[in-house]
Image (spheres, rainbow, N blue to C red):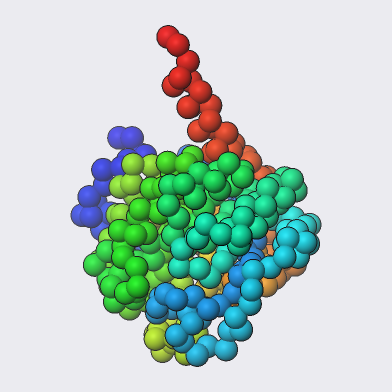
Amino acid sequence: MNDIRNNWTREEIAEIFDRPLLSLVLDAAMMHRKYHTFGEVQISSLLSIKTGGCSEDCGYCPQAARYQTGVKVEALMQLDEVLVAAGKAKAGGASRFCMGAAWRQVRDNSDFDRVLEMVKEVNKLDLEVCCTLGMVNEYQAQRLADAGLYAYNHNIDTSAEHYHEVITTRTYDDRLNTIANVRKAGISVCSGGIIGLGETNDDRIGMLHTLATMAMHPESVPVNALVPVEGTPLAENKKVSFDELVRMIATARIVMPNSAVRLSAGRLELSLAEQAMCFMAGANSIFAGDKLLTTPNPEFNADMEMFRILGLKPKAAFADGHPVKRQAEVNSMEHEPC
């Protein structure tokens, strides 16, 4: 049977998800070895280029304007500040640099023009450039592609059934439409979700089903564990257990073999041994640096020591080629005379 499938049923994913944990991890590790260089991990760095003041009501997010979380609203950063941060990220071992703005959606204005300039300039540092800016339409996605954007992050967060319990200011289809616009522009898709939002295991399976049945699997699938923030509606949610996180990573690895599975928010709570098991289960990407937008994250030095102990090595930038350039080549071939 072909491992890379887009016709998974919920029942098939549930069977994988419910396997005994050690058997599941072994199955995922074997799949990982088949499609990836074992022990090679992509290091990404995330910078909040515009913090706070978002009009959305995402129940987990400290940047929502309606919640009192102590996050200070800050204007869009200047280009030189972003380039300094990108240079530090690269010096610390990152091969991907992601810029996040607390916007509901991109607007065609001077701020977006400045972000496009940031994309162009960070590209010159030989880093894979990623953005997460909220919803984008086809035209905006194409402008990002033309600027050289490598990847766009837009998480689906949870299952379609549970989504309205977490967010009411945008729909599940809004998220899927943005992903479709990004994909059409030839940009690499980064899309995953968060566990710990009050969802059931059926919701977790449903979220994976949505991702695994896309016409093309996301090239990167972040698996986040909720970091509860005081002042948000989900501040009192129960902490996600380590085995729940491993189970999500391993299942994602099996149903989306070719995707990078990113161990993301919540990693600060894990011991070195627990992170090692996540890597065994198929995680091959991490965010490094002291912050994930506004929440704490392990520092670069600690991560480099972990890499040394576990025998991991950082993945080089553009190791998988550039999706925009690949798309341009495909488009060119389509228009060549027979």
The residue located at (37%, 59%) in the rendering is: 175
Q: Position of residue 83 (x, y in %)?
A: 75, 58
Which quarter of the rendering shows the C terminus?
A: top left
Eyeballing the image, is 235 above or below 204? below
- What is the tally of numbered marks visible in this picture? 0
Q: Quadrant of residue 164?
A: bottom left
- The front one of 144 and 261 is 144
- Nearest the viewer among 229 and 251 is 229
Q: Nearer the viewer, residue 248 or 54?
A: 54
Q: Is residue 184 left or right of residue 52?
A: left
Quadrant location of the N terminus in the rendered image: top left
Which percent across, then down, holds residue 200? 28, 72
Q: Is residue 147 above or below residue 13?
A: above
Residue 320 relative to residue 167: left or right: right
In this rendering, does residue 309 appear at all?
A: no
Note whether residue 49 is visible: yes
Question: In the rendering, at what x and y percent does residue 150 appear?
Answer: 58, 46
Residue 224: horizontal and vertical position, in percent?
Answer: 47, 67
Q: Residue at x 50, y 44 (%)?
A: 142
Most extreme residue toward the top is 338
Residue 257 versus residue 167: which sits nearer the camera? 167
Residue in the image at 71% along x and 51% along y: 122
The residue lying at 44 percent from left, 59 percent from top is 135
